Every structure is written in C-alpha cells, then in structure tokens.
Image (cartoon, rainbow, N blue to C red):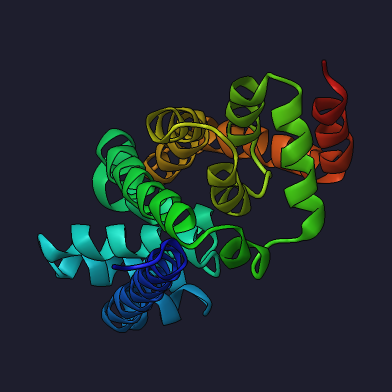
Amino acid sequence: MTSPVKEKVSRLDRATVFKFAGLVAFMVLMVVIVVVAWPYITDVFTEGGVERLVERVQNAGAAGVFVLLGMQFLQIVVAFIPGEVVQLAAGLMYGPWLGALFILVGCVISSAIVYQLVHKLGAPFVQGMVSTEHLERFKKFEETGKLDIIVFVLFLIPGMPKDVFTYIVPLTNMPFGRFLALTNIGRIPGVLGSTYAAAGFANGEIVGPLVVIGLLAVLAVLAIVFREKIMDVFSKER
C-alpha cells in the first residue's frame, strides 16, 4: 500500500516533470520561430529596415502572414522587437484594417501562450524576467479590487510596458478569458493608429498619418515620463 507521503512526492515529481517539459516545449517553439523569422528580423535594425521587411514579407506571398504573426509573437514574448515596427509593417503591407487584424490575432495567440505558460511554470518563471517592483505593484493593484479596470487602462495607454505586464497579470486571480479580452481590447487603439498611419503614408497621405503619429508619440512620452506616478495612483485606489 502506498503511503500518503509517497503519493504526495510522486505528485510533486510529476508536476516538476510537467513544468520542465512545458519549458522545453516553449524554448523549442521559440527557437523554431526565431530561425524562421531571423532573416526578416535582422533588417529591422538597419537603415531602411522597415522597407526591406515589407518587401521581403510581401514577396513571401501567403507565408508572409505567418512571418508577420511570428514576429508579433516574438515581439510580445521576447520583447526585443519594437512593437511599433511590426505594426507599421503590417499597415504598409495589408492596410489599416487587415493589418491591425493580423497584429491583434498575433497578440491574442501570444498572450494566450504566455498566460498558460505562467500558470504552468508559476511565479519563479516570471521573477527571473521582470522586476520585483512591478510584481509588488500588481499585488497592490489586485488589493484595490479594481484590477480589471487598471489592467485595461494600462494596456490602453501608449508607452506602457505591455509585454512585461503580459507576464505579470497571469500571476493575479484574473481568469484566462477576461485576461485575453481586457489586454487585447486595450491594445486596439494603438494598433489601429499605427497601421492607419503606415497605410496612409503608403498611399501618399501626409497630414492624417502625421497627426496620428504625433498624438501617439505625445501620449507615449507622457506615459513614460509619468509612468511611476500613474502606477502609484492606481496602487493607492480603494
């Protein structure tokens, strides 16, 4: 007869194996996506990179959509690709609406994977990637009882570190469906603004795209400058 202690140890061992297998699978997925997308990524950081990225993805035909989705996945999960670059490329290639749709589909898929990954691997997995300060802030957000509103607003404001927040929010008690809805609906105005501006420039428009980019830039600068004050205000709400 198996003792309760042995059964508990066995369950712990299975949980550890499952977490390790999940991490390995995630890393394999990351390697595959990086290998496929790397020729496109390298151009982003050089002069005229966005134009070459657009041309290469367009020349890839239908596969270009999957390249774009892969880059959006990397942008959220790894966060070494500027989000605006991917959004502008989507707008140039597919127009404001279809480009925004592809970006948002990529955001939903990436956010879903991150949420499940964090839930399976737990807080230690996240603690190695984000600051303790951010983790403590979100604990305070949860204590206010207004976590849903706070998360939505933080994802709505340009300039906020959304990719970092995507890893932290799953550590709260927010359900999976609500997490996907709030974080990705909050992204919509910024994504649409970027794809609209890019498509406008591609069509020879100047004033409209410049106004949109200027507005997004101002909001992003204000959010960066006053980021700590904004988060402090949310932390103190009751």
The residue sitting at 37% across, 53% down in the picture is 110
Numbered disc total: 0
Res. 185 image quadrant: top left
Rendered location of residue 25, percent (x, y)? 31, 74
Screen quadrant of the C terminus = top right
Query: Furthest-top residue in view?
Result: 238
On the picture, is 173 further left or further right than 87? right
Rendered location of residue 225, percent (x, y)? 86, 44
Along the line of sight, the residue nearer the viewer: 114 or 92? 114
On the picture, is 55 further left or further right than 160? left
Say if residue 202 shows up in the picture: no
Res. 55 image quadrant: bottom left
Screen quadrant of the N terminus = bottom left
On the picture, is 83 further left or further right than 2? right
Say if residue 67 shows up in the picture: yes
On the picture, is 209 further left or further right than 144? left
The residue sitting at 27% across, 52% down in the picture is 93
The residue sitting at 52% across, 80% down in the picture is 46
The residue sitting at 62% across, 20% down in the picture is 149
Along the line of sight, the residue nearer the viewer: 132 or 156? 132
Rendered location of residue 111, percent (x, y)? 41, 48
Q: Is residue 139 above or below residue 90?
A: above
Rendered location of residue 54, percent (x, y)? 31, 64
Along the line of sight, the residue nearer the viewer: 164 or 80? 164
Query: Furthest-front residue in view?
Result: 1
Q: Is residue 130 above or below residue 182?
A: below
